[in-house]
Image: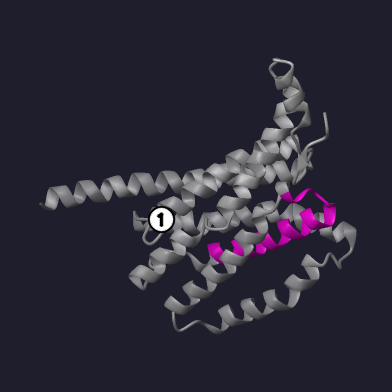
Amino acid sequence: MMELEILGMNFSCVLRSLSDSKFPHKDCWLPLISKLLGYCIIAASTTVKVPQILKILKHNSARGLSVTSFELEVVGYTIALAYCLHKGLPFSAYGELFFLLIQGIILVAIIYYYSRPAGMKSWIRALLYCGIAPTILAGQIDPVLFEALYASQHAIFVFARLPQIWENYTNKSTGALSFLTCFMNFGGSIVRVFTSIQENAPISVVLGSVIGIVMNGTILSQILFYQKSEVKKEKKKQ
């Protein structure tokens, strides 16, 4: 039987087993499922932040959104994407980072717009990012510094979520946060743990997905909790 490989996904082993009326061994189907899930995550990532963007545009407001959280998220995506490119990981293992980065930049720009007037500090941060990001993405920094930078991006993602979690807690509301976007982030983190292990990604990459599960899960639970509280308050008023 000819080797059948599409986008790095080898179907030959599974097809051979099925042609012999045998259930494929896990060494056949686990890598295939991992690749398929990886591409599913990438496909979903092309629109994961669109619900959040549309919600802001619909209400003409970024109420309840922490701009610091979204800025740090963009920094984290930049470092993670650069690291995966530098390590030569297969696209199925990190492709969503590219689309999340683009959407993250658009989202920050929209939040700046609806948080007018944007302060001088916001413009300085934006200019610093535009000046440094291309160098990081090109991998034109010392390898030791690159490893340290990637190690720090876990802390960056934690601190990217904490301001939003605190803001939600303080306001007892999740404001303009999109449930669909947060749910997709949470689900994507869970699936990415499995695919990262199957792709033999560095342990630091797996750790990043685990952190994503915890942080995104916390925000998702806040959305569910505070939405229920708001519904109860409205019923009492009626």
The colour style of the image is: one colour
Residue occupying the point 77% across, 23% down: 16
Q: Is residue 85 magenta?
A: yes
Residue occupying the point 69% across, 42% down: 207
Q: Amino acid under label 1?
A: Asn
Is residue 138 depicted above or below 146 in this figure? below
- Range of residues picked out in magenta: 69-91
Residue 211 shown left or right of residue 172 in the figure: right
Q: Magenta segment, principal secondary structure?
A: helix
Residue 16 shown left or right of residue 74 in the figure: right
Residue 208 location in percent, x, y?
67, 46
Q: Which residue is mark 1?
A: 168
Say how many tags the image has: 1
Is residue 79 depicted above or below 198 in this figure? below
Classify residue 144 by image quadrant: bottom right
* Camera sees residue 24: no
Q: Secondary structure at mark 1?
A: helix
Residue occupying the point 83% across, 33% down: 2
Residue 45 location in percent, x, y?
58, 54
Q: Residues within 10 Å of mark 1 (few under 14, many from 20)?
A: many
Residue occupying the point 79% across, 38% down: 200
Question: In the image shown, does 222 or 15 lie closer to the viewer?
Answer: 15
Is residue 212 depicted above or below 65 in this figure? above
Q: Is residue 128 magenta?
A: no
Classify residue 203 by image quadrant: top right
* Camera sees residue 38: yes
Residue 230 shown left or right of residue 70 in the figure: left
